[in-house]
Image: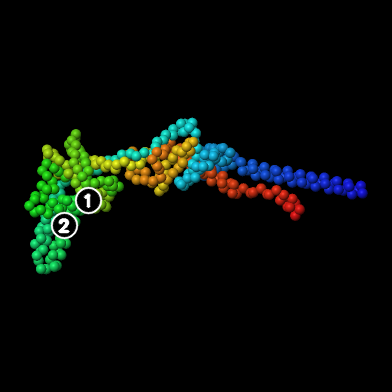
Amino acid sequence: MKMFFRFLILVLIVGGVYVGAKFVTQTQDQSSVTSHDKKALYFCPMHPSVTSDHPGRCPICGMDLQKADGGEPVTSKENKKSETSDVSGRASFPLSKERQQLIGVTSTQATLQELSYEVRASGKVAFDPDLFTAIEEYRQALQSRKQMEKSMFKDLKEEADQMVMSSKTKLKLMGLADTQLNALADKHTNPMNLLLPKGTVWIYAEVFEYEISGLKQGQALEAQAPSLPGKTFTGIVSSISPVLNTNTRTFRVRGEVPDPEEVLRPDTFVNVRIKIEFGKRLAVPLDSVLHSGDQNFVFVVKEQGIFEPRMVKVGVKTQEYYEILSGLSEGETVVTAANFLIDSESRLRNALKNIQQQGKEEAPAPPPPGHEGHGGHK
């Protein structure tokens, strides 16, 4: 009987030692996993995708790797609410006012602005004998068609119509407007006096295709000739050619400029300026808009210092502003200076967030309570 009690006590002691050892091992394993998850993370400020679990240098640029706080980006409650972004490769993040002042962050609101753009083009005073010839051809074609109206031959009528259409198209390609063509139909008027009153000259300006948007007949223009320093000639745009010059990628714009002193001689070179008014439109400064491939985006400053990258669609570009077609509302605040640093931080936060999520997915899950006993039994 005594031997039985001694054996029972021995079994209990051995079992307690075994269970205690398993508990300590489990605790150490969980502690090891937790320690692994919180292992220090080092990254390159210029190349956020380069990371390491120990100090070193970036293999791309050679910069010293910097330590991330806790091995993961800051995830305050405010940041968790705004960490999503529609701009690829970038994430929202908070930034204290002290750090904003340190790196020189400035901002402004998206507002309605009177947008205008000044087109600058090279040109010359017209010397165009071919135009006079084309005008005479057009007037003769009109006269021939009128004579054929009473003709019994249908073919002759159609041929006269085709001649009128051909000569009319030729004049349009040379820059004449429909109103001018209608006025030329009067055979009793002198075509040159009609198109170009005395004391007036034509100026041909070559405007690049990307600047032609918004240019209209009747807009004011200014011309200055290098051969006549100090003189400025003010006129209007009389017509715009509908045909693109494929060699120079320009459209010919004809301007009518008063020259009462007759100092502008044919073929004189001139510098032309045309101001295009677009009216009031939602706009932000040029420095606010960043470009990445085919993406245009801005950093919107939200409440509590959250910087949110946001896609925008831009329209007219002037010397100072971008028109915003979508992505922003009037009154929202956007970053105007230190955008490069803000963008770098945004990309870094996005990279660290991805690394953190990848680490969580790859880390082995701790065994459920009691599973060790089953394993030991097996």
The x, y position of residue 213, in whole percent, is 28, 47
| Res 327 label | none
Give x and y (percent) for residue 321. 34, 40
10 Å crowding of disc 1: few (<14), some (14-19), many (20+): some
Q: Amino acid at mark 2?
A: Ser
Locate residue 9 relative to residue 181 in the image: left or right: right
Mark 1 and mark 2 lie on one chain; the one further toward the N terminus is 2
* Residue 190 in sight: yes
Q: Quadrant of residue 185?
A: bottom left
Q: Residue furthest left?
A: 188
Residue at 24% of width from left, 46% of height from top?
216
Q: Which residue is mark 2?
A: 167
- The secondary structure type at the circle numbered 2 is helix
Which residue is under mark 1?
241
**Does residue 231 lie above or below 90 as drawn?**
above
Q: Nearer the viewer, residue 136 or 65?
A: 136
Which residue corresponds to the image point at 27% horizontal and 46% vertical from the top-left? 214
Residue drawn where x is 25% and y is 52% of the image: 244
Mark 1 and mark 2: Cα distance apart in space: 15 Å
* Residue 294 as seen in the image, left or right of residue 95: left
Q: Tell me if 301 is positioned left or right of 76 in this view.
A: left
One can see residue 124 in this view:
no
